[in-house]
């Protein structure tokens, strides 16, 4: 009987060690998968072209951000700009200036139909939440996203002046 209990004990010890090993392997695999899923937005050193003094104007129609470009290579495609907690597409004017137009968001609550009939509420729209930008910026900073050789890159501009 003692031998039987000894074998059972050793088997149980082996089983618990095997379970610990499997738990460690599973946790390592989960960590590896999660770390690969995180997209890293690395800011680039933008030596491809020169940027002048950036400024913005603010009025009833929104914020207009102007970024003068002294030398603009044709193989770079400008995409978006992040500024004051918002994002918008960049326009290139004459290859010399980048413009981002941030329109104001007027919060107007849409009419919502409330009824005990499920079909009466069919036309209700889902409220749209504002997107959070993936960067923490100061009041005088913006980030430009651009594509170079089909790779999205980001560049930070500081010292933007309000005019």
Image (cartoon, rainbow, N blue to C red):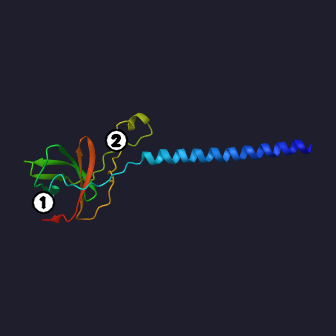
| Residue depicted at 14% across the width and 52% down the height | 98
| Residue depicted at 20% across the width and 66% down the height | 159
> Percent x, y for residue 122?
38, 36
Whether 33 is drawn above or below 85: the answer is above
Element carrying mark 2: loop
Residue under numbered circle 2: 125
> How many neighbours does mark 2 have within 10 angstroms: few (below 14), some (14-19), or many (20 or more)?
few
Q: Nearer the viewer, residue 86 or 144?
A: 144
> Percent x, y for residue 129?
34, 50
User: On the image, which quarter does residue 118 sit in?
Assistant: top left
**Where's the C terminus, which quadrant?**
bottom left
Q: Is residue 101 left or right of residue 127?
A: left
Whether 162 is drawn above or below 64: the answer is below
Q: Nearer the viewer, residue 155 or 143?
A: 155
Element carrying mark 1: loop
Q: Residue furthest right?
A: 1
Residue under numbered circle 1: 52
Q: Which of the numbered marks, if any, corresponds to residue 160?
A: none
Label 1 close to label 2 by CB (< 8 Å): no
> Percent x, y for residue 107?
27, 53
| Residue depicted at 34% across the width and 37% down the height | 123
Q: Nearer the viewer, residue 103 or 74?
A: 74
| Residue depicted at 21% across the width and 55% down the height | 46
Q: Nearer the viewer, residue 67 or 100?
A: 67
Q: Is residue 34 left or right of residue 88?
A: right
Mark 1 / mark 2, whichever is N-terminal:
1
**Where's the N terminus, which quadrant?**
top right
| Gap between marks 1 and 2 measured at Cα | 44 Å
Q: Is residue 80 left or right of residue 124?
A: left
């Amino acid at each position: 009987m003692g031998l039987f209990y000894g074998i059972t004990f050793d088997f149980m010890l082996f089983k618990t060690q095997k379970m610990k090993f499997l738990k460690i392997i599973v946790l390592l695999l989960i960590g590896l998968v999660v770390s690969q899923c995180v997209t890293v937005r690395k800011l680039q050193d933008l030596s491809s072209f020169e940027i002048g003094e950036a400024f913005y104007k603010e009025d009833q129609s929104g914020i207009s951000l102007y970024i003068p470009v002294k030398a603009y290579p044709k193989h770079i495609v400008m995409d978006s700009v992040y500024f004051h907690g918002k994002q918008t597409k960049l326009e290139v004017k004459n290859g010399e200036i980048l413009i981002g137009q941030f329109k104001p968001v007027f919060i107007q609550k849409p009419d919502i139909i409330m009824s005990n009939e499920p079909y009466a509420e069919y036309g209700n729209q889902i409220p749209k939440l504002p997107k959070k930008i993936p960067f923490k910026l100061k009041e005088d900073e913006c980030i430009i996203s651009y594509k170079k050789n089909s790779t999205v890159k980001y560049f930070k501009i500081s010292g933007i002046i309000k005019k």
